[in-house]
Image (tube, rainbow, N blue to C red):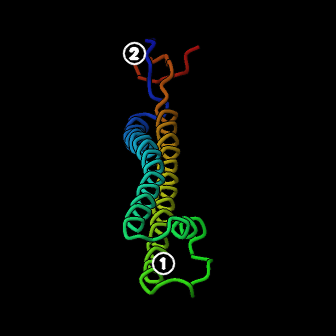
Amino acid sequence: MERKKKYVLGAGGAILRFFLMIPGVILILIGGIGILTTGGAGAATGEIREEAITEIRSSYQAQGIDSAIIEDIIKDGTYLGDGRSLTDTERQAIYDIEAAMVDVNLESMVGGGATVVAGGMSIGALIGGLFFAALGFLIGIRKWKLICNQCGTAINAA
């Protein structure tokens, strides 16, 4: 009798182990990289929004639009003051600022939503990879066996 480590499920189990573990490790890597990149993208979305608001503020102040009007639009998304006392140029600028703010807010929502979806997919890939790697590890467990030198019969070794 010879003491050897043998796969519990034999050669088929060893092959199945590698078919589960290799994609599992790849999914773990993809999920980890995805989580890192979505965190950076989420932080960048807020910075891009602030840059766009700063650009809107500076460009319309340079045109001579009152900063109180611009801040009102940035805060509420629309001008709540009396539009009858404004000139046609100021009214047109208000419409342009409101449209620009709708665009900035929409870009922020879409960018934030895409970041959430990508982050969820990354977490799903990470969990799936851990599942496949663990399953492959468990399938490929090797145990000590006592193997008969004459007939090759294997029994569990203590």
Query: What SS does tag 1 mark?
Result: helix
Which residue was labeled with disc 1? 94
**x and y percent of residue 72 in the render?**
58, 68
> Where is residue 133 drawn, in percent x and y?
47, 38
- Inspect the image, locate mark 1, and give the three-letter code of the amino acid beneath it: Ile
In primary-sequence order, the first of circles 1 and 2 is 1
Q: Is residue 109 above or below residue 121?
A: below
Q: Secondary structure at mark 2?
A: loop
Q: Quadrant of the C terminus?
A: top right
Is residue 137 found left or right of 62 in the rendered image?
A: right
Residue drawn where x is 47% and y is 25% of the image: 142
Q: Are marks 1 and 2 in contact (CB under 8 Å)?
A: no
Q: Residues within 10 Å of mark 1 (few under 14, many from 20)?
A: many
Q: Residue at x 51, y 22 (%)?
A: 143
Q: Position of residue 82 (x, y in %)?
A: 61, 82
Q: Is residue 149 above or below residue 123?
A: above
Circle 1 or circle 2, nearest the eye: 1
Kindly identify the residue that appears in the image at 47 percent across and 50 percent down: 42
Q: Label 2 is placed on what type of residue?
A: Asn
Nearest the viewer among 88 and 114 is 88
The residue lying toward the viewer, choosing from 105 and 100, is: 100
Query: Residue beneath label 2, please?
Result: 149
Which residue is at a point 45% across and 58% down the rendered structure image? Answer: 49
Number of numbered callouts drawn: 2
